[in-house]
Structure formats: C-alpha cells, structure tokens
Amino acid sequence: MKVAADAEKLRSQGVDVVDFGAGEPDFPTPTNIKNAAIRALDANFTKYTAAGGTMELKQAICERHAQDYGTDYKPSECLVTVGGKHVIFNLTQALLNPGDEVVIPVPFWVTYKDVVNYAGGKCVFVDTAEEQGFTVTAAMIEPHLTPKTRMVIINSPSNPSGAVLPREEFERILHLTSKRGIYLMTDECYCRFVYAGEPYSIASTPGARETVLVAGSLSKTYAMTGWRIGFGLVPQAVAGAMLKLQSHSTSNPTSIAQKAAVEALRGSQDSVPLMLAEYRKRREFVIARLRQIPGVKCAEPNGAFYAYPNISCVFGKQGINSTVGFSEQLLNQANVAVVPGEAFGTDSHVRISYATSMTELERGLDRIHRFIAERA
C-alpha cells in the first residue's frame, strides 16, 4: 500500500510511473457479478445480514469448495469476512494466546507477522531456498515445532514468490501438525491460479478438518478486490469463536457484495481460466526478460501473479545497500514501483506484480534493465 501511495503521489505530479507494486488483478469484475450487485440494489437488499454472512453465501462457498477441491464443509463451519485478510486476523485473534508460537515459511505475506504479533504470539520463521523455488518442506518445518507451537501457516501459491507446494509435501506437513494437535492454516487466496497440474486444497485430505483452517478469498479469483469478501472454512467451534469477535468488530460483510459473491461462486466460471491464460503469458515474458538482465536471478513462479527476482547484484553500487534502497531509487529515478523484499522477510529480492498489461510490463522491464545495467 505504501508503494502504491508513493507511486500515486508521483503520478499526481505528472510523472509517468509504471506500477508493479499492487497485488491486484487488472481485469474488471465479470459482468454477471456486477449485475448481481445491481439486482441486489434494485431489490433493496441493503440492510444488515447475519454477522457471519448470509446462509445463501455460506452454502455457495461450501458448494464451490466441494466442487473445486472435493471437500465437504457445512455452513456451520463457514464464516464470511470482510476480505481474506480479515479471516486471517479473526483466526489468529481467536486461537492464539500470548506466547503461542506460529511457524511461518520465508518469504511470507506481510500480514502474517503483524497479526501474530498483535495476538501476542511469537513468529518462528523457516527459511526456504531460492534454488528450490522457495518451496518449504516438512523436513524444514519439523525442527521448529515445539510444545508451544499453536499454528503453522502455509500460503500456496505464495505471495510473494509464486511457489506452489506439491500435494505430497503438503500432506507430510499436515501429518506433522495433526498428530501434535497443531492447527495448519492454508491461505488459499491464489489457489485457482496454478500453472501446472490441478488446483487442490489440503482440506480435502481425509481427517484434515479437525486441524486445518482454510482462509479463502474471492478477491483474486474473480477480480473482486474492492468488494471485500473472504471466508473461513474451519471446525465449528473455531467458527463460533471467530463469529463472536466479528460480531463486535465489523459485524456483517456488505450485503450487496455478498449477493455479488453468490453469483461469482454459482455463476459462470469462464473468467477464471481466461485470467489464468493471460497470467501464464505474462509470466513467461517477465521471467525471460528478468533473466536477460546481467546479475539478476529469478526463480520460476508456479502460481499466483508475482515474480520475485534477486537484485543483490547492485548492492554497493551508487548507494544501494538494501532492497528498500533499490526500490526507492528505482521509483524516483526510473519511475518503476516494486515492493522491497524486506516486507516479506528476505533481504535480496523485490516483488514484481505482473497483474498488468503487456505494454506496461515491457515498458517497466526495459526501465529496470537500464537501471541495473547502469550500476553493473
């Protein structure tokens, strides 16, 4: 958000900025979804709903998850939230006590660390290797599990790296956590955007429902970022605890957005493969282009819509000593916005979102190439 604000400030001054910062689809919300919201307005569906979402939407979420991943959740195990970030916040606040440990692979989405800290928990970070595409394994996680471990968070496909955890490895991690009574949170925000194989959910594994916590969102899958609809699929007792918290904070998600979400889940799914095909084309261009820049390395992302190149080749050049310094100079001197890796727990990378047009990708990557080449 800070990167977006800095870029917007420059744009307001007439600067031609290429923005690779925002983690947001550049596609419009599909027409059928927007029309559902219009119908809801025309029908005056503008009052309070149940704090945890309408029964209609909960059923639609359970049905879609069952159809996509083979799960069998009931509405009583579902909570609708104000975006995917909200469900993660509610889960950590409902389940963590001061001193509880949460295992988080690095690089991680920025919010995980802060919501755990806010709950009084302790983050235990597990470094992954760029050479292995930033994929975490059960063997890497196991040494970090202690009697204080309350939760492990897995985000696959990953923001920021695009890493996708193979099903077999995810199942090994579930075996580790479930036998110890540790919750396994699976952040499925980008679950439909994988470039090889079929999307899956670890929640479909037999016996998973007792300890698996699904954090889901409609934001990326249906280009509905501003509608703010997320959901949790969790044990019924956990859903009840989250609902108590939500009823005294936000209360219900927006009524109109809930009607649009029902249409997103039950209506045509044609927009999803179309977006994925476009992201795949962009990914191939971006990775190839980054690898043409002398000194830059970039692991191939297998999901989501981010590249996470290593730009440490410019450290020590013209006052650049960190990815924050790199990102600031790149924005102010080359007018390209990226997110520094320090936000995600690494010190040699920047995140580039390719959820933008090919024209912008070409312009921005040309600028990045020149910027780095001048400092080589």
Image (spheres, rainbow, N blue to C red):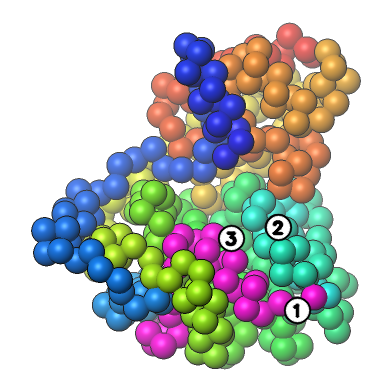
* Label 1, residues with CA under 10 Å away: few <14, some 14-19, many ≥20: some
Percent from the top left, x then y, of residue 323? 76, 31
Instruction: Measure how far apart labels 2 and 3 are at the Cα level.
Output: 19 Å
Which amino acid type is marked by label 3? Ser
Lower sequence index among marks 1 and 3: 1
Place residue 108 in its image quadrant: bottom right
304 displayed left or right of 266:
right
Q: Is residue 120 visible in this depiction of the protein?
A: yes
Q: How many marks?
A: 3
Q: Is residue 208 visible in this depiction of the protein?
A: no
Lower sequence index among marks 2 and 3: 2
Tell me where the magenta segment starts and ends, as one range. Answer: 69-98
In the rendering, which numbered label is found on residue 114? 2
Q: Which residue is mark 3?
A: 156
Which amino acid type is marked by label 2? Asp
* Label 2, residues with CA under 10 Å away: few <14, some 14-19, many ≥20: few
Instruction: Measure how far apart labels 1 and 3 are at the Cα level.
Output: 26 Å
Residue 89 on the magenta span: yes
Q: Which residue is mark 1?
A: 97
235 displayed left or right of 260:
right
372 displayed left or right of 47:
right
